Amino acid sequence: MAFSITTWNINSVRLRMPLVESFLASAMPDVLCLQETKCPNDAFPMAPFRKLGYEYSAIHGQKGYHGVAILSKLPIEDDQRRDFCNIGDTRHISAIVDAPGGRRIRVHNFYVPAGGDEPDRSINPKFGHKLDFIEEMACIRAETEREAGVSAILVGDLNIAPLETDVWSHKQLLKIVSHTPVETEGLIRLQQSGQWVDLMRQHVPPEEKLFTWWSYRSKEWDESDRGRRLDHIWSSADLAPDLLSVDVLRAARGWERPSDHVPVTARFGF
């Protein structure tokens, strides 16, 4: 039995709804997780999602900033929202998906703070916020609900490229926010302590370059290929053997009025 999940920082769901509709019509994932929806809950465009078969939703948004959403063709329950760092941002939502084969999967959808431009918390509060957010994420563990028969998947724009091959130039980006050692080490520590499996790197060997984001600042983004892997899909260990593929839709970066992130889809066979 097949199951698929996509994560995508859409950078305004209302602005890019035509792109979302086109993607869903062709890729047809069972679950779509969006970040940076930039939309309050009462203005979220549910009608086109329902038309495409995404009858179930868990939404956590605010006007103009942040925002996360889970859209599903499969029934979902027990949606939860956590306020990391007590700031009130809408950066996390989770829900249990009733997946094929009797599987129950807690899906966590995150939008981690970008962290500003200067990697020094003493002069840049945004960077401090990011580091504190990552530390607090340690409370989200892959095995938390396993005794109740619930597996886990964690997806989202985590705004950190942890491996040397997750950036176009490890040497040149060591002092650039998203690839500084304090960030990468923190994310890897979070992954290990939470017993998460990095599914993207299970499918694509760590020796190979892998990007999901290309800056708007680069007009020749495809030719220069100065990308970073900021978007992630992790799972509890029990799901890892069932992974069939991970697809990074690079072509989406070249669509008209695109997000600077592209959809990433994990497909399983249960």
Image (cartoon, rainbow, N blue to C red):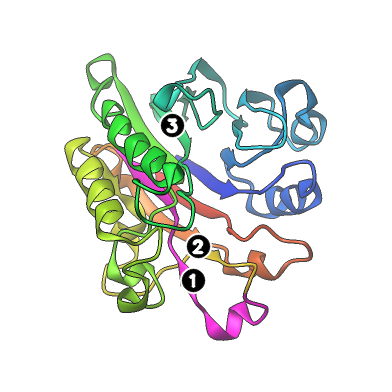
Q: Amino acid at mark 2?
A: Thr
Residue 210, position in %: x, y? 41, 69
In the image, is residue 103 above or below residue 206? Answer: above
Q: Is residue 147 left or right of residue 86?
A: left
Which quadrant holds residue 269?
A: top left
In the image, is residue 64 above or below residue 242? Answer: above
- Residue nearer the viewer, 107 or 216: 216
Disc 2: which residue: 212
Proximity of marks 2 and 1: CB atoms separated by less than 8 Å: yes
Residue 78, position in %: x, y? 48, 13
The segment highlighted magenta reads 218-235
- Which residue sits at x=37%, y=59%? 161
Disc 1: which residue: 227
**Other-residue count near label 2 (Cα within 10 Å), few / some / many at <14 / 14–19 / ≥20:** many
Q: Is residue 197 left or right of residue 2?
A: left
Which dot marks residue 108?
3
